[in-house]
Amino acid sequence: MTTKKIGNALRIGRFERTFEAELTARYEIPRLPDGPGRAHFFAAHAADVRIVITSGTAGVDGDTIAALPNLKVIVNNGAGVDLIDLPAARRRGIGVSNTPDVLSDTVADTALGLILMTLRRFGAADRYVRAGRWVRGGPFPYARDVSGLQVGILGLGRIGSAIATRLLGFDCAIAYHNRHRIDGSPYRYAPSPLELAESVDVLVVATTGDPHARHLVDRSVLEALGPEGYLVNIARGSVVDQDALVELLVGGGLAGAGLDVFADEPHVPTELFELDNVVLFPHVGSATARTRRAMALLAIRNLESYLDTGELVTPVLRPRR
Ligand code: 8YV
């Protein structure tokens, strides 16, 4: 494959390895330097940039959008666009694309893994064997059944729905909260996150990480979940009040938590390392070879579609023509 130069495009942030490989195999695109080099780059090239390519973990803030006067489109590798200033993009008519659907099953599998590992204490059980404690200490303590539980899903979108479908196979009763009730949904609707938490054994966070979702799971929601309740988060760390979560876990105010995402990744509160009822993943929700390739190819299809037709394949915001 020969690489093609796209002079009016700019890469922002570091990309996960499959996207990096697929993109560089096809295109030669300059990267926005970090540090002092950034101001020099803007001074020399800002007016040329029409396309920005970024990833879920890097994003494009309002200052960067303001610094690029001719920006027309932002292509994001990842479903979550919470690190892109969408209101600023909308005001300027800048299109934004993401990579929905192709990751839903894999992220839902991750949620199920976290639920099973946390409630059945599979991670702790594995550590028990490896540490030779089965021989010395006898049988491992009892865990909690997943089958037949009441599970609340905060954010019944594409990923939330894929989680619900899987849980039906475990005979779980599903409830959900979204800003609006979904017509025709087979699941019980809870009018607020608090009422959802009060009525379930496990609360699964599957919302977007948009500003309106910040701390949607606050201390009162966690307290409503209570000492017998579990929190699972595969969405964004910003949705949960992490300080309150840590405090409640340490003090026994929650039964446990399964977390793939954190408030300040890759930093994880060290208090959690001590707790055997907590399962910690390094944001691997979509991290399988097949899914990361599907995401990368969809991001590239968005780029190519914009170059060919001026339209995006999976727009979050359509570019103004
Ligand atoms: C990735 C994600 O971590 O898609 C998302 O929003 O959180 C993850 O799949 C990331 O986007 C990879 O760039």
Image: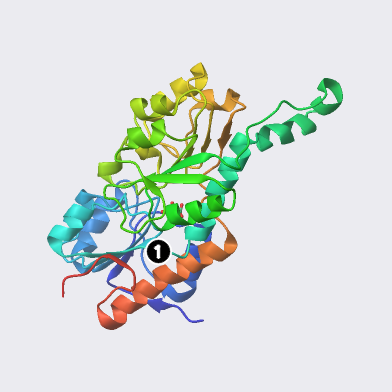
Q: Report the quarter where the C terminus lies.
A: bottom left
Residue at numbered disc 1: 99
Looking at the rendered structure, the kind of residue marked 1 is Thr
Please give the name of the residue rendered at 43% of the width and 27% of the height, measured from the top-left corner: 245
Q: Which corner quadrant of the image does residue 117 belong to? A: top right
The correct choice, above or below, for 120 with respect to 164 in the image is above
Q: Pointer 1: residues within 10 angstroms few (<14), some, or many (20+)?
A: many
**Position in image of residue 60 (x %, y %):** 28, 53
Residue 250 placement, left or right of 8? right
Q: Residue furthest top?
A: 251
The correct choice, above or below, for 39 with respect to 225 in the image is below
Q: Residue furthest left?
A: 91
Q: Judge by depth and name the residue closer to the eye, 307 or 293.
A: 293
- Asked if one can make out residue 271 in the rendered structure from this viewpoint, the answer is yes
Please give the name of the residue rendered at 50% of the width and 34% of the height, measured from the top-left corner: 201
Please give the name of the residue rendered at 53% of the width and 57% of the height, measured from the top-left corner: 106
**Position in image of residue 220 (x %, y %):** 34, 25
Label 1: element kind: loop
**Position in image of residue 208 (x %, y %):** 35, 49
The answer to whether the beta carbon of the residue marked 1 is less than 8 Å from any atom of ligand 1 is yes
Q: Which corner quadrant of the image does residue 114 belong to? A: top right
Please give the name of the residue rendered at 78% of the width and 28% of the height, measured from the top-left corner: 131
